[in-house]
Amino acid sequence: MAKKHKAKLKPLKPRRWTPKQSKRITGWLMVAGILIAMAAIQFQVTWLLMVALAEWALSLLFMLWHWRCPACGKSLPKTGKLSTCPRCGGEIT
């Protein structure tokens, strides 16, 4: 009988977005929220303004969740312009 070899599968790493990508997505989400708020003000629809505020809050949470170093995965400082991670020294693209 031939031996059956079980292939060892490596667990997939979760996809990490670069800070540049997360800033771009957050920017587009903020623009969408501004457009929704402008429509709410124009048409005087209060509930639509609440939707815009909730969308802004979600976009900020998205930014905080994905603002991580691509090398080590630790969260980055929220202020200042970064070129390297202060924890691991990895380059931030």
Image: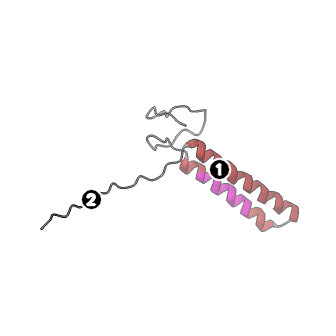
Magenta stretch: dominant secondary structure: helix
**Mark with earlier residue (1, 2):** 2
For label 1, the SS is helix
Residue 81, quarter of picture? top right
Q: Which mark is residue 78?
A: none
Residue drawn at x 71%, y 52% is 30
Residue drawn at x 77%, y 62% is 49
Density class for disc 1 (Cα within 10 Å; few <14, some 14-19, many ≥20) is: many
> Which residue is denoted by mark 1 in the rendering?
26
**Residue 21 locus on image (x, y percent):** 59, 46
89 vs 10, nearest the viewer:
10
Picture layout, residue 88 above or below residue 75: above
Residue 15 appears left or right of 33: left
- Gap in angstroms between the C-alphas marked 1 and 2: 40 Å
Residue 41 appears left or right of 90: right
**Residue 2 locus on image (x, y percent):** 14, 65
Residue drawn at x 51%, y 44% is 68
For label 2, the SS is loop
Residue 7, quarter of picture? bottom left
> Which residue is denoted by mark 2 in the rendering?
7
Residue type at the position of mark 1: Thr
Density class for disc 2 (Cα within 10 Å; few <14, some 14-19, many ≥20) is: few
Which mark lies nearer to you, 1 or 2? 2
Residue 58 appears left or right of 16: right
**Residue 80 locus on image (x, y percent):** 61, 33
Q: Is residue 58 magenta?
A: yes
> What stretch of residues is rendered in magenta?
51-62
Q: Is residue 75 magenta?
A: no
70 vs 88, nearest the viewer:
70
Picture layout, residue 11 above or below residue 78: below
